[in-house]
Image (cartoon, rainbow, N blue to C red):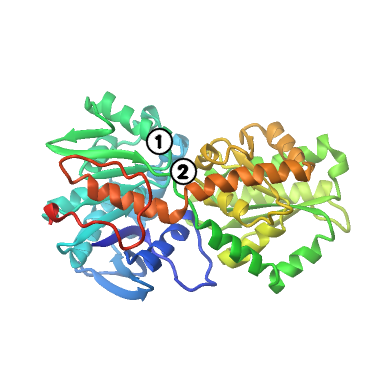
Amino acid sequence: MTVVVVSNRVVSPKPNAPIEGGLAGALLPAVRDAGAIWVGASDRLSSGKDPLIEIEPLGEGAIARVDMPAEFYERYYEGYSNAVLWPAFHSRTDLIRSSQTDYTAYREVNAFMARSLLRFTHSGSAYWVHDYHFLLLADELRKLGITRPIGFFLHTPFPSRNIMLSVPQHDELVRAMLSYDLIGFQTEDDLTHFADYLKRELDLEGKDDTYVFEGRPVHLQAFPIGINVQDFAERATKASAQPEITRLRASIQGRKLAIGVDRLDYSKGLPNRIRAVDRMFEIAPEMRGSMHLLQIAVPSRTHIPAYQELKQEISQLVGDVNGRVGDVDWTPIRYLNRSYSQAALAGFYRVADVGLVTPLNDGMNLVAKEYVAAQNPLDPGVLVLSEFAGAARQLDSAVLVNPHDIEAVARGLIQALTMTIAERRERWNAMMAKMKDFALDAWFNDYVAVLMDCRKPARVVVTKPLAPGSIPIDRAAV
């Protein structure tokens, strides 16, 4: 069986290339090791109606880049996907900017991608669609006569029913999503929100999280995404000797280091994070001169006004704190607007005494897991984690904070910076044990096995991960 993975973007498979976002970091190993084909948009736009596809081998699988339609792509991506769905799914209804033209473009691009995927349709293929850009894709594939298994995984949160109702086309979107055989979520909370919508808006009652809509069964399940723990730990160890990491370690001159790594996005809680660091210096003045925050904020969606305003706000906040609190030989906040390779980030995480991960709302947040995996087992750092990140359901041994409570984040940071080595080791060991139970290969294999199982008359619960290549083919669905 061939798994065809679909997302808006694919990334460079080069080992030292910057990787932006958790989805990219999660899917590359699946393609390389499990033989999947990853299909997504290229960097080029096309004026033609027929999809142009470039295929690049990668390990056991391949990456396929599709030239997307120039007429619709901007309004699909910067318009409907990221000015309607992204803010809605992160409960920021105040930032929703909807137009019928943008929604039409969203529909057109979903239909275009469906036509592109026909090239990969054969008797042994199954589709696994990722994230909010392609809520309509299964519906479009069904219109083209595709009967193979089609699954969907949402990397963002799914909002409560009341928030979802703020999306003008919510009814059409959810009905189209029910063309998938399997809809996966990061957490049980997200699944519950979706099920509540189905019950109250569509009058659908499920049994064992399986619903029947227009004669078609669709199954809901939570699949918390993980990382390759051992691989990332080894990468962090090797990175420690790289010149970039050595320079960072030398530059802090024995001071404590906290690190934050995020896309420059309003869901990540960066303004409150900067304010919390400022507040920490107020309530614990002895911390002045003794620690740095290294905040890496990767530019994102730079043409959208909300993101432009956020960048300006954070720059002003950082400048204000550094100007008031800093000294001639000490800058409290080091703020960088650029991306780094995973190898470099792994080294940065290992140097840092505290990982500061405080999103206002997040599907999972793999930075939290990467920070933990990168630590020295003998002298681990401390993770300060938002209780509104999906990762908090598993990493409950972190210092959990409410990112809306600046005082609480400040005190959580002080707790992390002053924690004893015995407590740090205890917390780290507990988090590592849970992360190994939710590793990336298990996430991939479990999802695909359940997707194929959904097409059988009676479902069988998968209790342990399958080895790559051992996923059974559903002959009855061919």
Q: Identify the residue position indicated by label 1 in the image.
A: 190
**Residue 466: quadrant of the picture:** bottom left
Residue name at image x 24 percent, y 29 percent: 207
Q: Residues within 10 Å of mark 2 (few under 14, many from 20)?
A: many
**Residue 454: quadrant of the picture:** top left
Q: Secondary structure at mark 2?
A: loop
**For residue 465, side relative to residue 249 (left or right):** left
Three-letter code, disc 2: Gly
Q: Quadrant of the N terminus?
A: bottom left
Q: Position of residue 256 (x, y in %)?
A: 79, 52
Q: Identify the residue position indicated by label 2 in the image.
A: 363
Three-letter code, disc 1: Asp
Residue name at image x 13 percent, y 53 percent: 477
How much space separates mark 1 and mark 2, taking CA atoms? 9 Å
Q: Quick one: label 1 or label 2, which is nearer the N terminus?
A: 1
Choose between 314 and 36: the one closer to the eye: 36
